[in-house]
């Protein structure tokens, strides 16, 4: 009897919705699209989906972006410290995709209760050159600026390096438009261009009041390259379609999508077709290759038609539970 009790407790722990690192240990690796996945893999997959939502999906896919100040030709740029003791910091410079110090990787860092309306429960980190954007503390005069420091390690992560980033290095991404976001920290303040929005202005932490320089357009460059950011994307449920980027109009297509196992996204259809019995892989590839496609739903054979079927969506409908379908969100 004690052995049976111990085994049951172990099974419950494996399916708990809270400890994401534990779930990740038994989660099948990205790219595992078996038509008949093992029951354990399906249960763990569903547990992780529930853990992360799907109440409100507004976050972008983990990737490398330029962060352009909305309505301007200025992008955030990593600037070396003015003195030896000063940390690198962020300031505005003319957007130039060839400048390495304008390429920022966005990856998930933690999950918590949403702090404000229209935000998900995922907190993000912004990294460049392997370090995290955070908040300069101890400032006596003026607003603290956004600087670059080694990524911290919160105690609750259990030492998993994919969950780097202390509280100051975690941001809540508040979606303002299709590809525009505010970066808000836990105390309620926002990343903001200090003073006039012009070349060379420093990025600071100021009250979120809608002033110019508080909204940033995400210009995608490629997927995440840092191995720890890649691992974090996997753990938090953004699935990589394949090893290669897919071209769309001269730009790289998103190489990850947010999977919602056992959910339908009804409506907003722009195309539908028979597909392979691959639990949505072909459907995801088709959506990534269509600039208008923001989400998809894959339906197993026998649920709607005799064959597996794919539905591409021009919007992200409200998810509805359905055990015979797998959906994915390509673009928020």
Image: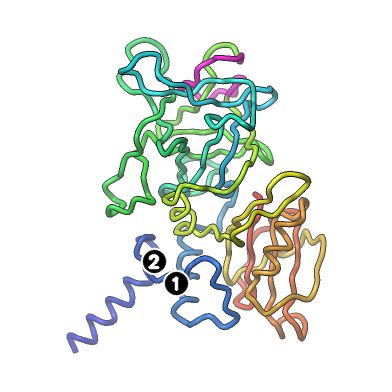
Whether residue 302 is situated above or below residue 238 in the rendered picture: below
Secondary structure of residue under mark 2: helix
Residue at 58% of width from left, 52% of height from top?
56
Observer-nearest of 91 and 298: 91
Q: In this view, does 154 lie above or below 29?
A: above
Q: In which quarter of the image is the N terminus?
A: bottom left
Residue 191 place in picture, x, y as percent: 50, 27
The residue segment tinted magenta is: 197-213
The foreground one among 109 and 83 is: 83
Give the image location of residue 237, x and y in percent. 51, 59
The residue depicted at 63 percent of the width and 78 percent of the height is: 324
**How far apart in space, not on screen, are marks 2 and 1 (Cα)?**
7 Å
Magenta segment main secondary structure: loop
Residue 166, disc: none
Is 216 left or right of 1, judged from the image as shown? Answer: right
Residue occupying the point 41% across, 36% down: 132
Give the structural element (helix, strand or loop) at label 1.
helix
Describe residue 319's horizontal placement relative to residue 231 as left or right.
right
| Left or right: 290 in relation to 22 | right
In this view, the residue in front, 69 or 102, is 102
Residue 198 within the magenta-colored segment of the rendering:
yes
Which quadrant of the view contains residue 265? bottom right
Q: Are marks 2 and 1 in contact (CB under 8 Å)?
A: yes
Q: Name the residue under label 1.
A: 44
Tell me if mark 2 has few (under 14), some (14-19) or many (20+) residues whose alpha carbon lies within 10 angstroms of its own.
many
Mark 2 lies on residue: 23
Q: Where is residue 141 in the image (x, y as percent from the top left)?
A: 36, 10
Categorize mark 1 by other alpha carbons within 10 Å: few (<14), some (14-19), many (20+).
Answer: many
Question: Which circle's residue, 2 or 1, is located before the other in the chain?
Answer: 2
User: Is residue 9 in the magenta section?
Assistant: no
């Amino acid at each position: 009897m004690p052995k049976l009790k111990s085994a049951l407790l172990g099974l419950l722990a494996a399916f708990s919705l809270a400890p994401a690192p534990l779930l990740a240990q038994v989660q099948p690796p990205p790219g595992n699209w078996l038509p008949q996945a093992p029951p354990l893999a399906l249960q763990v997959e569903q547990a992780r989906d529930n853990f992360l939502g799907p109440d409100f999906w507004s976050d972008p896919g983990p990737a490398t972006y330029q962060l352009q100040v909305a309505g301007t030709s200025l992008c955030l740029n990593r600037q070396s410290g003015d003195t030896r003791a000063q940390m690198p910091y962020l300031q505005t410079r003319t957007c130039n995709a060839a400048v390495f110090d304008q390429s920022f990787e966005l990856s998930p860092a933690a999950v918590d209760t949403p702090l404000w309306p229209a935000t998900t429960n995922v907190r993000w980190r912004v990294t460049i050159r392997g370090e995290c954007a955070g908040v300069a503390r101890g400032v006596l005069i003026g607003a603290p600026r956004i600087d670059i420091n080694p990524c911290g390690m919160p105690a609750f992560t259990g030492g998993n390096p994919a969950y780097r980033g202390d509280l100051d290095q975690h941001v809540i991404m508040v979606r303002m438009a299709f590809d525009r976001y505010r970066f808000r920290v836990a105390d309620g303040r926002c990343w903001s261009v200090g003073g006039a929005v012009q070349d060379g202005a420093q990025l600071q932490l100021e009250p979120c009041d809608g002033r110019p320089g508080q909204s940033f357009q995400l210009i995608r460059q490629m997927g995440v390259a840092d191995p720890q950011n890649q691992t974090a994307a996997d753990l938090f449920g953004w699935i990589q379609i394949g090893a290669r980027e897919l071209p769309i109009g001269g730009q790289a297509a998103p190489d990850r999508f947010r999977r919602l196992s056992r959910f339908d996204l009804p409506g907003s259809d722009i195309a539908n077709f028979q597909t392979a019995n691959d639990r949505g892989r072909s459907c995801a590839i088709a959506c990534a290759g269509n600039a208008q496609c923001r989400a998809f739903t894959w339906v197993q054979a026998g649920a709607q038609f005799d064959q597996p079927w794919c539905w591409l969506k021009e919007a992200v409908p409200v998810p509805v539970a359905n055990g015979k379908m797998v959906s994915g969100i390509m673009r928020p």
